[in-house]
Image (tube, grey):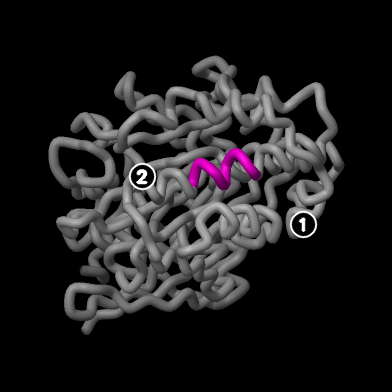
Amino acid sequence: MQTYKVIGIMSGTSLDGLDIAFCELAPANGQWNYKVKKATTITYPDDLVESLQCATKMSGLELKQLDIVLGNFFADQIGNFVKQHRLTPQVISSHGHTIFHQPELSLTQQIGDPSIIHAKTGLPVIADFRSLDVAKGGDGAPLVPIGDQLLFGEYDACLNLGGIANISYRDKSGLRKAFDIVPVNMALNHLANRSGQSFDTDGAIAKSGQPIKELIAQWSSLDFHSKAPPKSLGFEWFEKFILPGLTGHSTSDLMHSYALYASTQIANAIKEYMGNGPFKIMVTGGGAYNDFFMHCLRDQASDNQWVIPESAIVEYKEALVFALLGVLRIRNEANILSSATGASNDSIAGIVLGHPSNIG
């Protein structure tokens, strides 16, 4: 049984930083065994955060320059990580950082130039996992469901509470389905920043607030929530429909209200598309550490068993899954599920830079 040594990197819409995970993966009777051997999150410098926040309004030239800057940042941080831990990865698998994601316009764009990563690290790089699926009429998201199926098949569903909350589950026919539900940390971290914090530790600020009922009702009535899957969200949607409402009230009240709104949408989605529980649901992403948000979620869907796994999986599941996507690409096996994205068929997605002759 071959073991693959892969670095997966992920930069999420919440701008928490760059997740780097050195993983060992091995096929095992239709599933995959995994180990997250080393992992870290590199906080972005303030000037890079500011640039990424403004990226949707940049000119083409400015965006390409940011693509180069981010590619160099990724490459340097991976190089430091490998050197510090004396690692011997076979390949790097990079999600990049999403700037534009509008699949209805056949458009998705991730930056963090993979050519620079390959050139500076000397390692093969797999990148650009979304474009092929979008070209096939899919949403190009979510991409994680193949990992949920092959790595975490013992759960009825996997819920990720990152910048955007998304869920992956088996339907009654056994197909893996998935979709984005609602922004979570994208909004909560934005509000925490107003208090001089990068995030709301344990949900303490949100817990101290009071609900703003009219605002919760306004958000809950957004058309996206009544749209049938497959469906996905990007920063542009958050900027248009959520951000304007995050003003005019105290930060604590806004955070409290947003947590109630988002947790309710998650609970509603589970009931509508999975049916009545109880279900065993694994929760990952930074939101799993938000005690107030998890309290709201448990309150909304108390029948379910909400499992928060070990910290390495909570924090680095997406980086782990992108490591797996890279391995599947090298093995010439499907790594994007059309049942989750709505594409015409499954894809073997990702561009390959370099010659990973020692893998697969």
Choose the circle earlier in sequence order: 2 or 1: 1
Q: Is residue 333 visible?
A: no
* Residue displayed at 64% across by 43% down: 260
Looking at the image, residue 272 sits to the left or right of residue 10; the answer is: left
Instruction: State the residue at coordinates (61%, 55%).
Output: 287
> Residue 310 got which mark?
none
**Foreground: 315 or 55?**
315
Q: In the image as oriented, which residue stretches furthest toward the bottom?
A: 1
Residue 191: x and y, percent?
75, 37
Q: Secondary structure at mark 2?
A: helix
Q: Position of residue 326 (x, y in %)?
A: 32, 58
Q: Which residues are magenta?
A: 260-266
Please identify the quadrant where the C terminus is shown. bottom left
Tell me if 333 is positioned left or right of 158 in this view. Answer: left
Q: Which residue is mark 2?
A: 272
- Identify which amino acid the numbered label 2 is placed on: Glu
The amino acid on which the numbered mark 1 sits, given as a three-letter code, is Thr
Q: CA distance from mark 2 to mark 1?
A: 31 Å
Q: Residue at x 55, y 61 (%)?
A: 79
Q: Nearer the viewer, mark 2 or mark 1?
A: 2
From the viewer's perspective, is 52 left or right of 221?
Answer: right
The majority secondary structure of the magenta stretch comes to helix
On the image, which quarter does residue 324 sit in? bottom left
> Where is mark 1, residue-wise?
201
